[in-house]
Amino acid sequence: MTSASSLARSTTVEKPEPRLNDADTIATEIVEKLTYSIGKTVKAARIHDWLEATTLVVRDRIIDNWFESTIKTYERQDKRVCYLSMEFLIGRLLRDAISNLGLTETVREALARYDVDLNLVELLEPDAALGNGGLGRLAACFMESMATTGVPGFGYGIRYVHGFFRQEVVDGAQVELPETWLKHGNPWEFERRESSYEIGFGGKVSAIEENGKLRSVWRPGERVLAVAYDTPVVGWRGQHVNTLRLWSAQSLDPILLDAFNAGDHIGALLESNKAEAITRVLYPADSHQAGQELRLRQEYFFSSASLQDIIRRHLAQHDDLTNLADKVAIQLNDTHPAVSVAELMRLLVDVHGMEWDAAWKVTRDTFSYTNHTLLPEALETWPIHLFERLLPRQMQIIYQINAEVLREATAGKQLDDGTISAISLIDENNGRRVRMGQLAFVGSHAVNGVSALHTELMKETVFHDLHKVFPTRIENKTNGVTPRRWLFQANPGLTQLIEEAIGPGFKDDITQLAKLDPHAEDAGFREKFVAIKRQNKQRLAHLVEERLAIHLDPNAIFDIQVKRIHEYKRQLLNILETVALYEQIRSLPHLDWTPRVKVFAGKAAPSYVQAKEIIHLAGDVARVINSDPTVRGLLKVVFIPNYNVSLAEIIMPAADVSEQISTAGLEASGTGNMKFALNGALTIGTLDGANVEMLEHLGEENIFIFGLKADEVARKRAEGHRGQGVIDQQPMLRSAIDSISAGVFSQDDPNRYANLMNSIRDRDWWMIAADFRAYWDTQRQLDVLWKDRAKWDAIAVRNTARMSWFSSDRSIDEYAHDIWHAGPKGR
Ligand code: 26W
């Protein structure tokens, strides 16, 4: 093309020509980026430069579709879904983007021309770890599924400078180190200086009279700026591209020059430091609410910025805000953005002059709320005095909402004081606190749990009384995971094998995985399936060898438990079974033991003492067992430090056994359980969270369920169950607990685990002793099954074949249809 004709084209045609996607073009473009954007020659380029250049070339291809999706949504005035989440645990983006665009082999070939290996380039990208665990990863899977299924979705969150901490294990103990994902810049994001909003804190509220009516005016004592950073989220085949908008805090005045000129160089920067602190770091706790002012500032900061942005966009297209709920659905991902309910009321009533009742209808019709945990210590409440000081107008609004909800609830009914105090937004019993769960509930038209069991328990426990008043509000939306990341990208070998067996249709319609089911009976297919599993196990073994200098035998069962470390997730039950197995192998070496590798990984909240002790114990047990020649070849234990999304992508496809063994009633859903099973691991688990639905879909021969059920746990707790009685009846368990207590695994500090072990003897709140025997027996059942390879492998194949319902596309379809009324399935 001559330069003259390209000039003519650019003045007459708005939409760019579709780019060529052959290896030649891509290679040329990568070198152009290297040269003109990065300023390096091919010869001088380091591998980081290749990463950046490749990312920019891939990004160009996404941007074309991004504009198209955005313009289409705008022109058709489609309803938008805004997913408000304090966390997005995204992981790496390059491989995901290339794969969803269908360019993996082409980009590989393009780079190979310069002797650059795409795999190595991909490994350099830092994980975007803007989340703690399940809730944050679910938000990332949902963003990808919204893009894939064509729901016009906007993720709203926080651009933390430091994501989830890096974990090192030093002398057995977890050490937290800062994470610096932005160190080399972030080529995926676009700063949108024009989309910035003022966020207020503190100050005073006054009422002014306007046209005979009182209007509240909030004059904040402090203001910060929220600046938007946009990242495109590309769906499968690149058709639809959504936006993840993350907010960064900046001070309005970068420096107080008067103070600076007067010689107060530190004071001159105080304001800007205080503002920027809001988005500096992700809170690393997912079990206890932090209860700190900075956390509430984060919550309000991103809620207010997101709502102001949503309102601005709406008013750019519509005359007023009365039809907001027809054009926008806002999903609250847990209670972290629940202050949005009060903030939207403030914006509608105080700023945009809407009548209270009309505003309340708009608010309720717009919001919906997902609950992700029933753990009492994780439910968010804020002291009234703190709330009032930081957000005085929002506090008034909460009082007013409370009064009206209580009036609505009592209308025509006689409610006792207990019910009234249970549904109140203010907890009067613990030093007066605002209950964010109640606020989210009453401000939403739909409230959902994340698995069938969890949803039922929500109705019986946290929201028992609100559920009675609003009996149709709670519904279930079982979680899912994106098969693009967790099957296609993480397990290309298996993906290719599936394609050879059933054709490529499953890539666009994951329910077609069911066609794989009959292949479970085909010995030839099973052989190939197992060969791929073996390669994946070797890949993990290689990583463990490199990082920990521990050799793993791929012939052994790879038995894996990776997730946040929590007492309720019961890593301790797994460790006790490991110790018991170790002692059994030592005392009965002549028996035909099935070789096992026990893999653990996960992070503990920095202030969670017991969780940190569990990590220490896993490491101590690993060291003793791995250096004992009597069990060599039969039992190995590893704790892999710094579990994150990228490590999960290597671990999930390498598992033979997936440990999903939470105390029944405590795991809201679990999503790791789905990733493992999709990749052909056999689950050993309790009837908890989405394991219940997995049992339904897999059939009881294909999943290994044991232990107390949720109602049995509740009953035992009510009866005052203690561990000691059970321990006395279980010699293997007693011996394992006694060994750990006696310091067999911690000779440098024999009392290290005294508290941990006593908590099982004296209390056993998590039913570790109570479930031990059932767990042990089920593990031995798996040992026996491993020897019948045809049977094991058939079950593994059936797991992959029957897991398609757990795709997050299905979850998103349900939200779109039942709650949002948006997107192709929701209209
Ligand atoms: C306020 C401190 C805090 C922070 C985060 C409390 C609780 C949380 C999250 C709600 C914890 C979480 O990630 N929950 C997990 O959500 C997943 C997605 O729904 C579920 O699969 C897990 O079972 C649930 O533990």
Image (tube, rainbow, N blue to C red):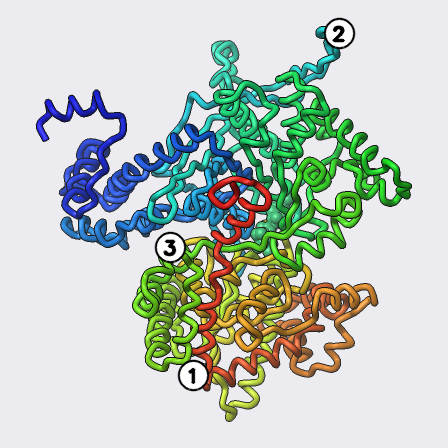
Dot 3 corresponds to which residue? 508
Residue at x-position 20% and y-position 24%: 10
Residue at x-position 23% and y-position 54%: 105
Q: Residue 702 vs residue 801: left or right?
A: right
Quarter of image, res 443: top right
Q: Nearer the viewer, mark 1 or mark 3?
A: 3
Give the answer, above or below, for where 358 lies relative to 431: above
Residue 558 seen in render: no
Dot 1 corresponds to which residue? 789
Q: Residue 123 vs residue 159: left or right?
A: left
Q: Tell me the tag on residue 212.
A: 2
Q: Where does the image place residue 763, in percent across and percent down from the top left?
A: 76, 66
Circle 2 Cα neighbour tier, 10 Å, few/some/many (<14 / 14–19 / ≥20): few
Amino acid type, residue under disc 1 in the picture:
Arg
Q: Give whichever of 43, 98 is nearer the camera.
A: 98
Give the answer, above or below, for where 674 lies relative to 594: above
